[in-house]
Image: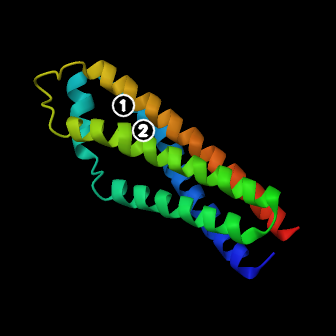
Amino acid sequence: MSTLVSVLGIWVLTSAAVQLGTLWIMKLSILPMLNTLPYDRYVTVCHLIDMHVFHPIAVWSGVIAAGVGVWAAIASGNALVATLFLIGSVGMVVVGLASEGVNRPIWRQIEVWSPRRPAEAWARKRRVWHNAHQVRTYAAVVAVGAYAAAMLGVVV
């Protein structure tokens, strides 16, 4: 395989792994803690988390990784390696869709909730947010696995 495919592969694998790391930390530590809190403390803690920097970085990193993964697939010249890069890119697109289509809009609502006045259907929104986070986390697992397998195909 070419040096170009190696560089592209290392980039997408690293990007997907960093994304997975942040999502996995949330899955294992932050969300279980948040999900045990009553409404007022849930909202107060969420208000303390500044997602205005994280969200754009995560989204653009995922979008760029998906595009670079497609580029690596095309440049690879190997059907199996190309398929693995494409599977990884689909995983990153799912991460982005879950994030931007579900998680981020709900988070923007939480940012304006009052801890003193329960928001309408807050428990359902919290559950939907949690489920979407699970989807995007496992999509990132698929992306990392597929990109790592593609890289094995590149170096072998």
Quarter of the image that includes the C terminus? bottom right
Residue positioned 42% across, 34% down in the render: 31
Amino acid marked by disc 2: Ile
Mark 1 element type: helix
Whether residue 31 is visible here, answered yes or no, is yes
- Which element type, helix, strand or loop, lies under badge 2? helix
The quadrant of the picture occupied by the N terminus is bottom right
Residue 60, located in which quarter of the rendered image? bottom left
Q: Where's residue 140, x and y in %?
A: 58, 47
In whole angstroms, how far apart are the C-alphas of marks 1 and 2?
6 Å
Amino acid type, residue under disc 1 in the picture: Leu
Image coordinates for residue 124, horizontal then vertical, percent: 32, 19
For mark 1, what is the residue?
34
Could you classify mark 1 by the number of other residues whose Cα lies within 10 Å: few (under 14), some (14-19), or many (20 or more)? some
Give the side of residue 49 with respect to residue 40, left or right.
right
Assess whether mark 2 and mark 1 are in contact (beta carbons under 8 angstroms).
yes
Pointer 2 residue: 30
* Quarter residue 121 falls in: top left
Residue 128 at x, y = what percent?
38, 26
Residue at x 52% of width, y 44% of height: 94
Which residue is most to the right? 156
Residue drawn at x 72%, y 74% as measured from the top left? 6
Which of 54/98 is in front? Answer: 98
Say whether residue 32 is visible: no
